[in-house]
Image (cartoon, rainbow, N blue to C red):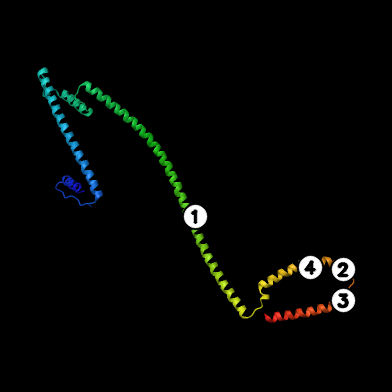
Amino acid sequence: MCEKIKKVNSWLSTVFGDQPVPQFEVNTRTVGILYQLAQASEARCSETALLVEDLKQKTSEYQADAAHLQDVLLQGVGLSYSGLSKQATEYVSALVDHAIVLGVRDTSLSSFFPAINNLTSDILEAEKSNRRLERELKALRKRLGATLVLRGNLQEDLNNTKKSQAIESAKAEERLLTMGFVKAKAQELSQRQDKSEAQLVSRNMDKSITHQAIVQLSEDVNALKKEIIPLKKKLEPYMDLSPSPSLAQVKIEEAKRELVALDSQLEMNVDFK
């Protein structure tokens, strides 16, 4: 870790020169990243130095070749670059510029033709790649259009869902309020019922006249009526017989006594209420 920090500080000092090195947080991550950058920078500088040396060597070789050709032209043909016409100088300059653009070692046809063929192949390959990229771009545009449409539909569905959720939330809140009111009302009624039952108990109320007792009595009466129906059917053959006077008198007296008892019971019930 210490060696990495030393290397990083040395590299930063070299990079910024006379300017102060910016402050940074010293931890394992930052030191590791800066150390990798320092190594990559040194490797790149080393490669650049080698490339510069190679270019210097090629420049020396080209200068030696140019001097040799000038000597050949001067000694063999008697021509020098300064003795050429303006048009010839332009041609030579254009030839040199083309050679530099094509990256050939010399200006001979054997060097130009392969370079031109390679450049033509590169152009054809670039056009082929361009057509492929155009097809991919069209496909991407088509998919992008479909994606935008889908996104719009999803956004619309989302908005509808939010609206529905808001409505359902309002309904749920209303139900909760109603439920709370019903619970409070039920509790109030239960308290009132308990209070009423306590008052009835304190007044020694007869349970036989309660609603539940009356309902039970009504059910019993209905059951008795159903039992009386077959008995009435059995008595139907005897209904046409003439009643005995003495027996009828007894029945009349019994009916009178029952009527008196019912009147007394009715008066008691009225007085109780």
- Along the viewing direction, whichever of 256 and 110 lies nearer the viewer: 256
- Residue 202 is drawn in which quadrant? bottom right
Dot 4: few (<14), some (14–19), or many (≥20) neighbours within 10 Å?
Answer: few
Mark 3 or 2 closer to N-term?
2
Q: Are marks 4 and 3 in contact (CB under 8 Å)?
A: no
Mark 2 or 4 closer to N-term?
4
The residue carrying mark 1 is: 164
x, y (%) of residue 195? 58, 76
Dot 2: few (<14), some (14–19), or many (≥20) neighbours within 10 Å?
Answer: few
The residue carrying mark 3 is: 247
The residue carrying mark 4 is: 228
x, y (%) of residue 11? 18, 45
Residue shown at 22% from the left, 45% from the top: 35
Mark 1 or 2 closer to N-term?
1
Secondary structure found at label 2: helix
x, y (%) of residue 52? 16, 34
- Along the viewing direction, whichever of 32 and 267 lies nearer the viewer: 32
Q: CA distance from mark 1 to mark 4?
A: 63 Å
What amino acid type should be assigned to the residue bearing mark 3? Answer: Leu
